[in-house]
Amino acid sequence: MANTTTAHTHDDHDHKPHGLKRWLYATNHKDIGTMYLVFACVMFFLGGAMALVIRAELFQPGLQFVDPSFFNSMTTMHALLMIFGAVMPAWTGLANWMVPMQIGAPDMALPRLNNFSFWLLPFAFTLLLLTLFVPGGAPAGGWTLYPPLSLQAGDSFPLTIFAIHLMGISSILGAINVVVTIMNMRAPGMGLLNMPLFCWTWLITAYLLIAVMPVLAGAVTMLLTDHFFGTSFFTAAGGGDPVMFQHIFWFFGHPEVYILILPAFGVVSEIIPTFSRKPLFGYESMVYASASIAFLSFIVWAHHMFTVGMPLAGQLFFMLSTMLIAVPTGVKVFNWCATMWKGSISFETPMLFSLAFLFLFTIGGFSGLMLAIVPADFQYHDSYFVVAHFHYVLVPGAVFAIMAGVYYWLPKWSGRMYNEKIGKLHFWLSTIGVNVLFFPQHFLGLAGMPRRIPDYSTQFADWNMVSSVGAFIFGFSQLLFVYVIWNAVRSGEKAPQRPWESAQGLDWELPTPAPYHSWETPPSRDVVAQGTVQH
Amino acid sequence: MSRQIRHVLNSAAASLVAAFAPLAAHAEWGNLNMPVGVTELSKQIHALHMTIFWWCVAIGVFVFGWMIWSLVAFRKSKGAVPDTSITHSTKAEIIWTLIPVVILVIMAIPAARTLIAIEDTRNTELSIKVTGYQWKWHYDYLGEDVKFFSALDRASDETRQLQSGRDPNEVADYLLNVDKPLVVPEDTKVRLLLTAQDVIHAWWVPQFGMKKDAIPGVVNELWFKVDAGKTGIYRGQCAELCGRDHGFMPIVVKVVTKEEYKAWVAAQKTGGTNEAAPAAEAAPTVASVATTAPQG
C-alpha cells in the first residue's frame, strides 16, 4: 500500500474556510456529511426522548403523565423525527462522506446543491418541532397522516405539511446528487460492478427516493387543499375516498421502508467481509438482490392496508408479491452467512453491531413474513405485533447499521481510534436493551393489544412494564455512543492508514485522516484495482 | 407543554413507588400467543399463524445455527485461517433462492384458501350495521329496529382519567368493558356492515379472528359465526388510530343462545331502544368466562 500515500501528498493542503462560514457555506462533502450526521444524532435523541415519554406512560396501566392527545402527538412526532430526521439524514451523511471516497472522486458532483439539501433540513424540522407549541398541539394522527383524522389537526397542520415538503425536497436533491456522483465521477477502472456495495445500495436507494418522494409530496398537497381550499380528494362527503390516500401514501411508504434499510445492507456488506477477513460472498447476487427488493417495493404497498376492504384478487396479489420479498432478502442473509463461513472472524465494535443487525433484522424479517399472510394479518394488523416487527427492522436493523458504519469509518474520518471497551459496552447495552424493549411487544400484539393507545387493559401490564424497562436501558445507553465519539475525536489514539487490516475499498487507500478533498487526482488504475471488487 | 411537563414531574415520584406493584398483583406472563378463538375462521387463522411461525422457527434454527457455528468455529482468536477462495457459488445461490420459493408456495396455498373463506359473505343469517364514532360504536340490527350506542363503561372511564388516583387493577375488565354490549346468537353467521361517521376506526375482536376498518363513505363487510356452545363475553378494541380517545372505545360482544337472543330482541323492542341492558348483566358476573383475557 505504500504507493497510495505517495500519490496523495498534495492533498494535505486543506483550503478550508474557518468558523461559521465553513459550515454555512459548506460545499465540501465531508463537512456536509458531518453536518448531516450531527443533525441526525440530534434528531435521534429528540425522537428518542419522545419514545421515552411513550414508554413512561405505558409503564403501567392508567394515565400517569400525559393527556391522550399529547400521547398521540408523541407517537406521531417520534415517527416523523426518527424516519425523516434521524435515519434518512444519517444515511445521506454517510453517503456524503463515503461515496466520493469509495469511487475515487474528489467530492460530490453537485456541491452547492449538497449545501442546499442539507440546510433545508434544520428549517424543515424547526417547522415540525414548532407544532409542539401551537394551538391544538403537534400532529396527533399518526405519521401516516391518514385522513379524515389528520384533517382534524389544529394549527399544526400546515406547518407539518410544509415541513414534509421541505424534507422531501431535501431528500430528492440529495438523491440526485448521489446518482450524478456515482454515474459521472467514478475513477477510471471503477466499473459499476466494481463499486463497494454501500455505493450500490445507495444508488438504488437514490432512485427509490427520486421515484417516491414526489408521490408523498402529492399526497400531502392533496391533504392541504382538502383542508384549506375546499377540495374533496379524501373526503367522502364531497365524493372523495379516504382509502385513496392510503394507497398513495403507501405507494410512497413501502419504498420508503427500503430507503431506510437498503444502505444498511450496504454497510453490513462492507463490515462483515472486513472482520471475517474474506471477500463478500456472491457480490453480484447481492447487487441483483438489492435491485429486486427495490423493484418489489413498488408492487407491495397495499399490504399495509389489508383491513381496508380490498377485493379478494387484490388481497391475493399483494399477499403473493409481499411473500416474494422474502426471496431476495433471504439471498442476502445467506450471502452474509456464507461470507463468515471459513473466515477468520474477530469481534470489534463495528462487527458486533453488524452481527446484531444480521440476527435481529432476520427476526424482523420473520415477523414480516408472518404479516404477509393476509388472514393472519387480520389479527396482527395495527397491533403491537406490527410495532415489534417494524422496530426490529428499523432499530437493530437500520440504526445498528448506521452505528456500525460510524464505528467502522470513524478512524478514517477523524484519524483517531475510538475506545473499544466503551464501544463494546455501548453495543451490549444497546443489544440487550433493544430486545428487552421490543421482543415482548410481539406477545402484547398477539394477545390483542392495539398500537397507538396511551393506556391498556391490565392483562397487558406485565410485558408493557418489561418493554418500558428495556426502553430506558436502550435510550440511556445511547449517551455512550455520543461519549465514545467525542472521546475518540478529542483524545483517541492515532489511527493507522488502514485501521482494519483486511478492509477493502478505495476509502481505505486514502491517508488517515482522510484529506479534506478526497481524490484531487483520480487514483491510478493500480490503486483502483487494489481498492475495488474484483471478479 | 409546560402543563405536560408538570404532570410528568408530579407523577414521577408516585409512579416509582407504585411501579412494581402490578408485578405482584397479578400474573399474565403466560399471555404470549394469538388466541385460538371461537369461530371456524379464527381457528383457521390461528393454524396459519402457527404454521408460518414454525416455518420461521425452522428457517431460524438453520440460519442462526449457521451463523453461530461460523462465529464459534472460525474465530481469529482461535487461529482460524480465512479461505479467501470462497467468493461465490452459483449452485448454492440457486438452492437458496429456490427453497424459499417452495416454502412460500406451500404457505400461500392454505393462506389463499382461508382468505377465500373469509371473503365469502353469502348465506348470512343476521346483519348488523356498525358505525364508528369518535369514540364509541353504534350498532343497528338491520330489519329488527334495534339500535344503540356502545361506549366505555363508567368505572373504566373514571379510572382512565389523567391522574385519577384510581387503581386500574381494581376495575373489572379495565378499558375492555362497555355500557351496552353487542348481543349476537351462537352458531349463526353474523355479518357486520362497517362504516364510520367521522374518521376511520377498526372493529377487532381477537377471539373472532377478524379485524376490519370502519371508513366514512365506505361500507365494509366482516362476518363471524361463533361455534355452538361458545356463549359468553368476548372483548376487543378499536384498532385504527381515531383521535384522542382511540384507546377508549372497546368492543364487547355477548354471545347467547338462539332462544336468549330472540328474547333479548323482543325485550329491546318493547323496552325502547335506549333502555340500556343493565351493565351489571354484561360485565362482572359473566366476566369470569371471558375468554379474551384468560386469567393466568
Image (cartoon, coloured by chain):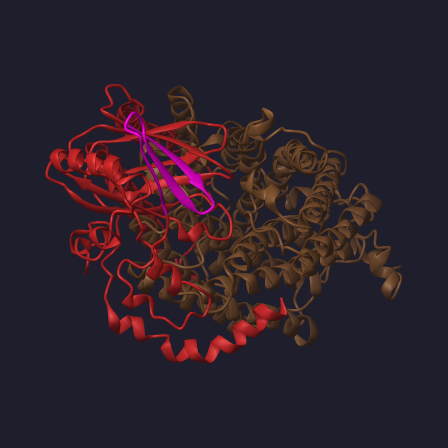
The residue segment tinted magenta is: B127-150
Coordinates of residue A515 in the picture (x, y in percent): 78, 58
Q: Is residue A46 visible?
A: yes
Task: Say above or below: A458 vs B60.
Answer: below
> What residue is at 57 percent from the left and 29 percent from the top?
A237
User: Quadrant location of residue B77?
Assistant: bottom left
* Quarter of the figure that contains the C terminus of chain A: top right
* In the displayed structure image, the side of residue B33 where residue A140 appears, left or right: right
**Residue A342 appears in the figure:** no
Give the mark count: 0
How far across and down, in percent of the image, does residue A82 sit? 58, 54
- Along the viewing direction, whichever of B29 and A3 lies nearer the viewer: B29
Residue A58 in magenta stretch: no
Q: Nearer the viewer, residue A9 or A394?
A: A394
**Residue at 76% in and 50% down:** A118
Colour in which the image shows chain A: brown
Closer to the camera in the image, A99 or A397: A397
Based on the picture, tell me whether residue B128 belongs to the magenta stretch. Answer: yes
**Residue A353, position in %: x, y?**
49, 58
